[in-house]
Amino acid sequence: MPGTRWSRLLPTALLVTLALTAITVWSASDDIEAELGARAKAALSDVGVSGGQVSFSGRDASLSGFPPDKAAQAIDAIQRIDGVRTVEISGDTAPPAGPVTTSGEPPAPSTPPSPSPSPTPTSAKPTDKAGFQAEIDRLLAATPITFEPDTTDLTPDGERGALEIAKLLTDAPRDLKFRITGSVATGSDRKLALNRALTVERLLERNGVKRDQVYSPQRKNSDGASGEGRRVDITAEQR
């Protein structure tokens, strides 16, 4: 009967369909493995790794036979291939411990950071007359407080020197005072010498030195015409 005939043919048709599907899947799997195998070969060649084999089961890669120092590089190269799902390595090809560079060579040992240099201790500020005088002399020797010829105008270096002195004297004890003596290069221009001392006195006061701790009593002559006398000297005194 017709119904019976179709019922007998149906299982056969299903088996044929399943067989054709399996053949198609198997064929597609072979194509994927062949394509991934070709990509793997090219990827390993690009990074200069040889001496091993790569096989695929579908999209899963298995590596074997690579030298231990090249294993990590081989794994990295295969993992970068588009379409690869997993990468396994077998045999005596385990990569060496520690990170491996893209060239396959172990990185150079890291050098421990050198210790930071100890900060240079700053000298303590003086607290007595002798200490302040020594520090004043040191500062004036390094940067004298000098003036332009025949004027009360400080030279750029002279102004820097005066500001350094101001920083020192700002915290001077109240039982100290400082005499500022003006000098001229030649002659006996008392007024110019005194005005130079007053110029420095006012600069110190503007920069934090207490007014009653600095004063300008007289002028001081200097021999010669070298210009070394165009300056002021500062002397620490006990009240």
Image: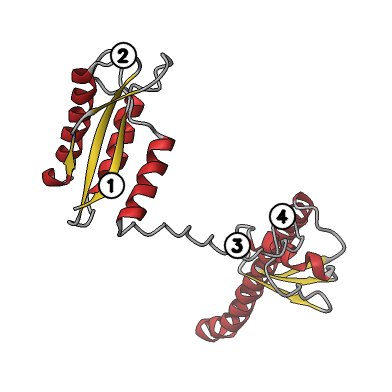
Measured as percent of width and height from the top left, residue 200 is found at: 22, 32
- The mark that comes first in sequence, 2 or 1, is 2
Q: Is residue 59 above or below residue 131?
A: below
- The mark that comes first in sequence, 3 or 1, is 3
- The mark that comes first in sequence, 4 or 1, is 4
Front of the two marks 4 and 3: 3
Q: Which mark is residue 7?
A: none
In 3D space, how far apart are the residues under numbered discs 4 and 3 (Cα atoms)?
A: 46 Å
2 and 4 marks in contact (CB < 8 Å): no
Q: Which mark is residue 236?
A: 1
Q: Is residue 103 above or below residue 67?
A: above
What residue type is disc 3 on?
Answer: Ser
Q: What element does badge 2 sit on?
A: loop
What residue type is disc 2 on?
Answer: Gly
Measured as percent of width and height from the top left, residue 144 is found at: 37, 31
Q: Which mark is residue 187?
A: 2
Q: Residue shown at 59%/85% (left/top)? A: 8
Q: Residue furthest right?
A: 51
Indicate left or right for 96 with 169 as reference: right
Q: Is residue 29 above or below residue 176?
A: below
4 and 1 marks in contact (CB < 8 Å): no
Q: Residue shown at 69%/60% (left/top)? A: 101
Residue that badge 4 annotates: 39
Residue that badge 3 annotates: 114
- The mark that comes first in sequence, 2 or 3, is 3
Residue in front for this viewpoint, 99 or 11: 99
- The mark that comes first in sequence, 4 or 3, is 4
In 3D space, how far apart are the residues under numbered discs 3 and 1 (Cα atoms)?
A: 45 Å
